[in-house]
Amino acid sequence: MSYEIKGHLLGFESMTHIELNEVDELFWTMMDADNKDISFTIINPYKLREYSFDLPSDMKVLLDIHTESNVHVYNIVMIQKPLENSTVNFLAPIVVNMDNNTVAQIILNQKRHPDFGFNETIKSFRK
């Protein structure tokens, strides 16, 4: 299924649509729907840690998110070997409105979210 990018994904402003594919309960792939050579590994942050933030009102409008909306949140992972050394960017979540197939990335303020980093290893959460 294809998801329309509203706004942009940092560093990939020309992408307009992505596809999401579940690998397992923790990992997913996010692929440029128009160029299959561009793909990312993303992670379900809620499987690693407590992860909550207020969705800015402009993002709610952009993605047409309401109280009952089915929203998923993912974070980009930089894969390393071994896998536990892979790092997660918790400061730039990808928000997906599953109801209308739209997606956008937001940048969280590190001062408001001091517990979230942009380069945190998976092993620091898996005990």
Image (tube, rainbow, N blue to C red):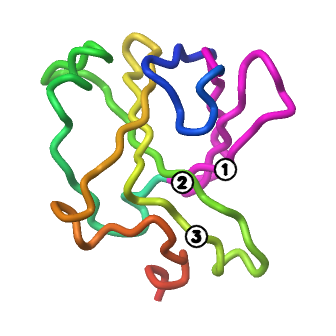
Percent x, y of residue 37: 86, 33
Q: CA distance from mark 1 to mark 3?
A: 11 Å
Mark 2 or 3: in front is 3
**Magenta part of the protein: which range?**
15-43
Tell me the residue at 39%/42% (across/down): 73
Amino acid carrying label 2: it is: Ile
Q: Secondary structure at mark 2?
A: strand
Q: CA distance from mark 2 to mark 3?
A: 10 Å
Position of 102 with respect to 35 (left or right) is left
Image coordinates of residue 51 in percent, x first then y, are 28, 59
How far across and how far down the image is residue 17, in percent? 62, 16
The image's mark for residue 94 is none
* Residue picked out by circle 2: 43
Asked if residue 11 is positioned above or below residue 60 in the image, the reply reads below
Q: What amino acid type is highlighted by mark number 3?
A: Thr
In the rendered image, which quarter is residue 115 located in?
bottom left
Contact? badges 2 and 3 (CB < 8 Å): no
Look at mark 3 in the image and give the residue it sits on. 87
Point out which mark residue 41 bears: 1
Dot 2 crowding, Cα within 10 Å, few <14, some 14–19, many 20+ = many
- Out of 16 and 48, give the one closest to the viewer: 16
**Label 2 vs label 1: CA separation?**
7 Å
| Residue drawn at point x = 63 percent, y = 52 percent | 24
